Every structure is written in C-alpha cells, then in structure tokens.
Image (tube, rainbow, N blue to C red):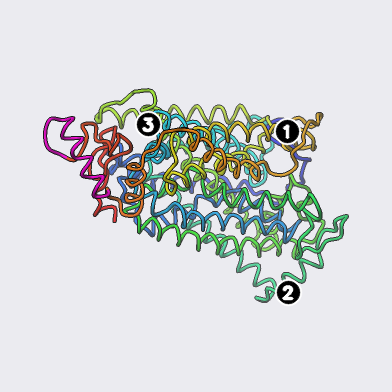
Amino acid sequence: MSTILADPPPPIDNTWAVPGIAIPATIAAAVAVYFVVRSVRDSVRTPDDFLIANRRIGPVQNAVALASAPLMYSTLFIITGHIALNGYDAAMLLTAFTTSMVLGVLLFASPIRNLGGYSLGDIFAMRAEERSARKAAAVVTLLIYGMFTIISLAAIAFIFNRWFGLDNVAGLGASVLVVGLVTVLYAYMAGMAGVTRLLVFKAILTLTVVLVLTLLVLAEFNLNIFDILDKAEANRKDVPAGYDLLGPGREFGEGQHRLVHLSKLFCVAVGVAAIPFLFMRNFATTSGKDARRSAGWASMIVVGIYMCMALVGFASVAVLGPERIGVIKAHRDISLPKLVDELGGPVMIGVLAPIALLTIVGVYAALLINAVTCVTKDLNVARGRKPGRADELKDIRRNTLRIGIGSVLVGVAMLPVRTHIFIPTSIDLAGTAILPAVVYALFWRRFNTAGLKWIVYGGTALLFFLVIFSNGVTGPEDAIFPGHDIKFVDIEPGLITVPAGFLLGWLGSISSKERDDAAFAEMQVRALTGGLAPGVRKDAARAAAAAAGGPGGQSPNGAGPNGRGPAPGGPDDHGNQTRTPSEAR
C-alpha cells in the first residue's frame, strides 16, 4: 500500500469496507453511466457537437452539471473529516469554494457565453495577436489539466483502499488504469453532451446521498442542530493551543498561521473561479442569459450541499468521538465512511463507493474535454494547422484517445510520487495566469499582447519559483522532499502571485505601444450582447469587401475585425458556425 499511494499514510484498520456490495454497485453505476452517455452519442455529428454540444445545453441541465463539477472527493469526503478535526477553520474552506462560484456568476458566465468562442484562446485572441494568444492559452490550460489529472487519478487509489478495502499494489494500479480508461471511453463516445449527462447523473446521485446522510444525522439527534454542535464541541479532539471546535484557531491559531489560513481561503476563492474546465462550460449554453441563470442556480445548489456536508462533518465527531475520527491529515477521509457505517450500515457504505468514484470520473471527463478543445482550437492554430471541417471531428476523436490514454498512463506511473501539492498549485495557477488575463481582456481598454504574455509567462514562472520554496516541496513530513528544508514561503503562493499577475498585466500593457480600441469596443459589445458594435461592424464590412473584392461584412477566413476572434453569425478560423447577435441574446 505504502509504495503506490502518492502520500503514504500510516496504516488504517479498515473495518467498514464491504467489497461484496461495493463492487456490484460500482459495476451497475458504470453500466448506467454508459447508457446515459450513449443516449446522446448519435447527436454528435460535427466538431461543435463534440466540443460544445452545439451550444444546446439548457439552463437547468447546465446548472446541475456546473454544480456537479466542483463536487470532488476532496470537497465532499475529505472535507468531512477535516471539519470533524478542525471545526470552524475547516468549514471556512467551504465558504471559499462558494465564493468562487459567486465570482463566476458576476465575472464570467454571461460575457463568456456571449463571446461565442470555444476555448480560453478564443478569449485571449480577441485582445492580443492570435498565435501568441493561442500559445499562452495552451500553456496554462494544459498545465492545469496535467496537474489536476494526476492528482485526480491518484485519488482513485485512495478510494479503492478506503471503500473497497483493496491494499494490493498491483490491484490499486490496475483499478486506477481501468477507471481512467473507462472515463476516456465516456468522453470519446459523446463529447461535451455526454460529459454533461454524466455530470448530471453524478449530481443527482450525490445530492440524493447527501440528503439521505443529512436526514440520518438529524434523526440521530432528534432534528436538533444545536445538539449536534454541542455534542461535537464536547467530543472535540484536544489540540495543544486549546481552541474550541466551533471557534477559529484550531488549525491556524495566531500570528503567521492566520495569514496562512487567509492565503488558502483567498486562493480557493479566486483560483477555482478561473479553472478552465469549470468556467468554459458557459460556451455550451444556449445563450448568455441562460449561462448567467445556470451559474446562479449552480451556486445555490453547491451552497446547499456544502451546508449539509458541514453539518455531517460536525456530526462525525459528535457521533464517533475524538478517537474514532481521522486524527491526522492523511486520514481525514476515513471519518465519513465510519459515520456512514455507524448510521447506515454496510449497504449504505457499499452504495457510497461508486459515488466516491463518480466524483473523480466526472471531474476527469470534464478536464479531458477541456484539454481536447484546447489542443484542437488553440494548439492547431498556433502551429498553423487547420484541418478541413470534414476531418476535424476525426481529429478531435483521435486527440481524445491520445490525450486521455496518455494521461491515464502517466497518472498510473505517478502514483508512487507525492503529488498532493498539484491541487493548490493548479488552483493558484488559474488565479495567477487566467483570472487577470480574462478580467483585463473583458474590462480594460489598454490590454494587449505584451500584457497577456507578462501575465501568463511571468505569473507562471513566479508561481513555480515560490512553490519550489514552499511547504509542499521541502520541510514538513508530507513534502515531496521531507529530508531537506529550503523553504521560505509558508503562505499559499497564490496570495502573492495573483496580485502580481494583475500587476504584470498592467506593466506589460503600458510598456508596449500596441493599442487596439476597436478590438476592445468589439469585445465589450460582444460580451454584453453577442453582436458587433455598429461602427466596428461597418469597418469590418468595408475591410472584408476590399479583401474579397466584393460586398460583405466578414473577412475571408471568417474572423472578426482586425482578424481577432470568431465573427458572430459566421464561421471561425476552423469553419465552425458561431451565433448571430439575436441567437446570443
């Protein structure tokens, strides 16, 4: 066991796993997901169908899928034990996740959809030189994809150990391989439409289980929440500083430690909001209005689920007591199965096993679609490769298999490595290199190619420099190199690099003479309405007519004014049809 897990914990006495129930339940769930995804396979006939479901995802379906994506193993299963051990300080992390959802509603949802693109590169290319913009988008998107994928696949090994009682090295590696390849199959079958159905299926099952578990907890305490909190406080695990469970300070008590806690909350709030596979779902909705509505509904769903999980976390220590919960960092995910075993018995434990796997499968499938879109729409343009429309869908499917299978094999090979630092680093990277660039692209007239490069490359370099000298690489026992200590950064690096990203974007932009007010005007109008500004549209029509030798309002390659971004109502660089202003509204 200790040679396969990324962060080998001390052994546990697994008395709750019931593989006789968990394995059949997991197979049944996998078959059910197969038929759910297969139900939309025949609708995938074009590249648009595969990558963005031809922008046919309605607000209700997108809301459920968007709410499902951040419901990960860490935010459902691990956080329960975290709250049972650290109380208020751990619960604050859930507020940071919900804050990120609100930021997504306020900043991204409607404007991103109205732009009518496909990938992060489409947003950048509307304000910067296209090849530079596509390269920058590909760098940050694929870095986040790689880190998130490796840690997601590593989590599968934990799940099979905790919920299936498997501790054989070869068995854990084979399990990760099978689950990863099955997920690739789901994504290959039906693209974005299939992944959306998968996420909706996962959300329905997860919500059902969370509600049942919450009702069991409430029934145990006669529907009295105050009794749960009082018993949790009475049963709390004592800490050297003596802080209460229901008050701040148990994990981050005083002085520098409080700044560490603040940095974690800040990075989660701003970083999760900018993770590409989450906010790029807005491109698949039917309109900007529906994207905003679905993001708002998703936020409310997530808030409700996190409130229930916080209650379950406090109930864990109230029911189990201080000795039976996971009392060390590596064991925080054993509190929930122990509580479920106590209240629901082996049947509920067995049923929860496939739910735990679905939390990983749903995230990895969404990550894979995002990576394939990036390779197809950004890397191909940056390399000057533009496959014909008839060949593009075949190219997309090949990319899905290549990226998916390759990622799974890398993930299995990385299992022995301590990669837990990849989660906070990927979140910090999103906040550092994506959030400032998107905000400037949408709202600052002076933003240009130099500003984009300074943000993406300068911010990424600064982040990785600080990560190397942080707690996750050297110092503590769970660091990658625990025998060495060269760290000087105790806080989450994103607390430094996110503001630095905004500063770098400003410095880079003002240091360059490049300025394109017409591109900013187009960006503003398209973000608000989905159409072109009248003056910009007229100039674009004249330029296109001159280039083509005839009338028309669109350049020969289908680009918008100045050759940047897809023109609404016409084909983009790859021949894909974008929406007209009325359709976007």
Residue 34, horizontal then vertical, whole percent:
41, 44
Above or below for 551 versus 288: above
Give the residue type at disc 2.
Asp
Between 493 and 226, the residue placed more toward the observer is 493
Q: Locate residue 214: give its quadrant.
A: bottom right
Give the residue type at disc 3.
Glu
Most prominent secondary structure in the magenta stretch?
helix
Task: State the separation of the CA atoms marked 3 and 1.
Answer: 35 Å
Start and end of the magenta stretch? 533-552
Between 565 and 33, the residue placed more toward the observer is 565
- Residues at circles 3 and 1 in contact by the CB criterion of under 8 Å: no
Task: State the separation of the CA atoms marked 3 and 2.
Answer: 60 Å
Residue 237, horizontal then vertical, whole percent:
82, 58
Above or below for 34 versus 514: below
Magenta-colored stretch includes residue 121: no
Mark 3 secondary-structure assignment: helix
Residue wearing tag 2: 227
Give the residue type at disc 1.
Phe
Q: Locate residue 516: give its quadrant.
A: top left
Residue for point 40% across, 50% down? 282
Residue wearing tag 1: 469
Mark 2 secondary-structure assignment: helix
Residue for point 28% across, 42% down? 42
Q: How many numbered badges does the structure rendering display? A: 3
Residue wearing tag 3: 130
Residue for point 60% across, 37% down? 151
